[in-house]
Amino acid sequence: MMTYNGYLIDLDGTIYLGSEIIPAGKRFVESLQKKDIPFLFVTNNTTKTPETVAMRLREEFSLTVEPTTIYTAALATVDYMKDAKKGSKVYVVGEAGLIQLILKAGFIWEEKQPDYVVVGLDSEVTYEKLMKATLAIREGALFIGTNPDKNIPTEKGLIPGAGSLIALIETATQQKPVFIGKPEAIIMEKALGQIQLEKSEVLMVGDNYETDIQSGIKNGIDSLLVLSGFTPKEAVPHLPEAPTYIIDSLDEWMF
C-alpha cells in the first residue's frame, strides 16, 4: 500500500449517504486532519456552494472543514467557462447554488441567445426550462453538462441525477455535451491545481465506480473504491478495470 501526500475524496455515498453520516467516512476525514494530510472533497454536487456544503457537514454531521477543501462540479464549470472565452451570456438549468456561482463569476443571464447552456441537477425542472435549453443549443450555444451522474444515492434509494436531465436534452438536440464533473479530465485537472499536488501523489477515494473510480482510471490517478454507497459488492468481480484498492469500509484504510 502506497503512502499518498494528498487525498481527493467524494462526499455523497462516501462521507454521508443522503441525510445520514457514514461513521467510517467521518473518522477517515478526522484522521487526515489529525495527521495534517492535505485533502480536497471533489464532488459532482452542483446544487450547493462550498460554504453551504461546509456548513452542512458541520451542523448536520459534526464534521468541521473549511470551504476551501470543497471543490464542486459547479466551480469547475465556472473555471471551464472562463477558460473557454466563448462569451458572457448563459442559460442554466439547475438549482440556486449553481446559478449563483455562475452569475457571481460575471456571466450574464440570457434565455434566448446565450453563449453557453449549462445543465445540472434541478429538482424543480420544468418542460419550459428544457425547451429553452434545447432551442438555445440548437441555435449554437455551447452545451455544458455539469456531471454525468444518472442517479444519486440517497437513504430512499437511487434517484435521478443531472445525467438523466442532460441525456434528455442530448436526445432533443442531437448534440453531445461537454461534461465537466467526474470522471472527466476537466474537474480532475482543476482539483489537482487546487490541492497543488501531482497525479502520482494523490489517491481518489469514492463509492461510485462510474464517476469516482473512473476519474482515477481515466486520468492516471490511483483510486480507492469503498463499498458504502453506489457500487455494490456483487458488482466488483464484473468491473471492467479494477480500482487500485477496494475496501468495505474506510476504517480499513491504513495511512
Image (cartoon, rainbow, N blue to C red):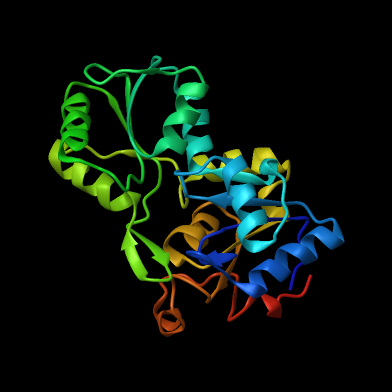
Residue 38 in the figure: left or right of residue 156? right
Q: Quadrant of the C terminus?
A: bottom right
User: To which quarter of the image does residue 61 belong?
Assistant: bottom right
Query: Residue drawn 42% across and 31% down?
Result: 99
Vertical position of residue 210 compared to residue 148: above or below: below
Residue 56 % position (x, y) = 59, 52
Residue 33 in the figure: left or right of residue 152? right
Q: Is residue 125 visible?
A: yes
Q: Is residue 3 visible?
A: no
Query: Residue drawn 46% across and 52% down?
Result: 183
Residues 177 and 116: in front is 116
Residue 25 % position (x, y) = 64, 69
Q: Residue furthest right?
A: 35
Residue 75 in the figure: left or right of residue 130? right
Q: Quadrant of the N terminus?
A: bottom right
Vertical position of residue 219 compared to residue 96: above or below: below
Residue 70 % position (x, y) = 63, 46
User: To which quarter of the image does residue 250 belong?
Assistant: bottom right
Query: Residue drawn 22% across and 34% down?
Result: 129
Count of numbered badges drawn on the protein: 0
Q: Residue furthest front?
A: 59
Residue 139 % position (x, y) = 18, 21
Vertical position of residue 65 compared to residue 252: above or below: above
Query: Residue drawn 47% across and 49% down?
Result: 45
